[in-house]
Image (cartoon, grey):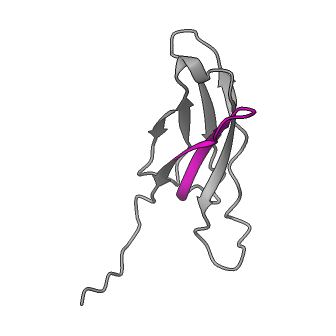
């Protein structure tokens, strides 16, 4: 599986990520997930991503797309991914990181 992340350095904007399966795996079930909780105490602005949408071949390669629409909630930063499964086979996972464009790092070096 290969992942393409769009607007990954602007999480406060609408964005998407796509999961592309190789031809032998094209019949796998693909789901989206949040890998890491990025807010404290179960903040409601830290939701799981929406379900994947399958886009069959047209002008692009067939892929599963996750659209992250920002409604002013600034909820789409963190680590997200796709999971591909097929009965009787090992699960495959791939992740991407979406970062805020105005993020600040308080780093301590010893």
Numbered range of the magenta stretch: 78-94
30 magenta-colored: no
* Residue under the image location 72 percent in, 74 percent down: 42
Q: Is residue 100 above or below residue 21?
A: below
Please state which of residues 88 and 78 is positioned toward the viewer in this rendering: 88
Give the quadrant of residue 105: bottom left
Q: Is residue 81 above or below residue 40?
A: above
**Residue 74 in view here:** no
**Residue 98 in view here:** yes
Left or right: residue 7 versus residue 48 is left
79 magenta-colored: yes
Residue 30 rendering spot, x and y as whole percentages: 68, 35
Total tally of numbered discs in the picture = 0
Left or right: residue 104 versus residue 14 is left
* Residue under the image location 60 percent in, 24 percent down: 25
- What is the residue that sits farthest to the front in this orientation? 88
Residue 81 rendering spot, x and y as whole percentages: 57, 47
* Residue under the image location 58 percent in, 68 percent down: 38
Left or right: residue 23 versus residue 71 is left
- The C terminus - image quarter: bottom left
* Residue under the image location 41 percent in, 51 percent down: 9
- What is the residue that sits farthest to the top in this orientation? 58
Q: Is residue 16 above or below residue 46?
A: above
Q: Is residue 54 above or below residue 59?
A: below
């Amino acid at each position: 599986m290969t992942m393409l992340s769009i607007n990954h350095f602007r999480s406060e904007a609408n964005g998407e990520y796509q999961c592309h399966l190789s031809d032998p795996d094209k019949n796998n079930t693909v789901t989206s997930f949040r890998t890491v909780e990025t807010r404290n105490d179960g903040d409601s602005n830290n939701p799981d991503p929406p379900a994947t949408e399958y886009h069959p071949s047209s002008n692009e390669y067939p892929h599963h797309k996750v659209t992250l629409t920002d409604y002013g909630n600034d909820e789409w930063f963190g680590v997200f991914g796709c999971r591909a499964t097929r009965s009787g086979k090992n699960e495959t996972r791939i992740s991407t990181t979406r970062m805020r464009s105005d993020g600040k790092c308080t780093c301590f070096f010893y």
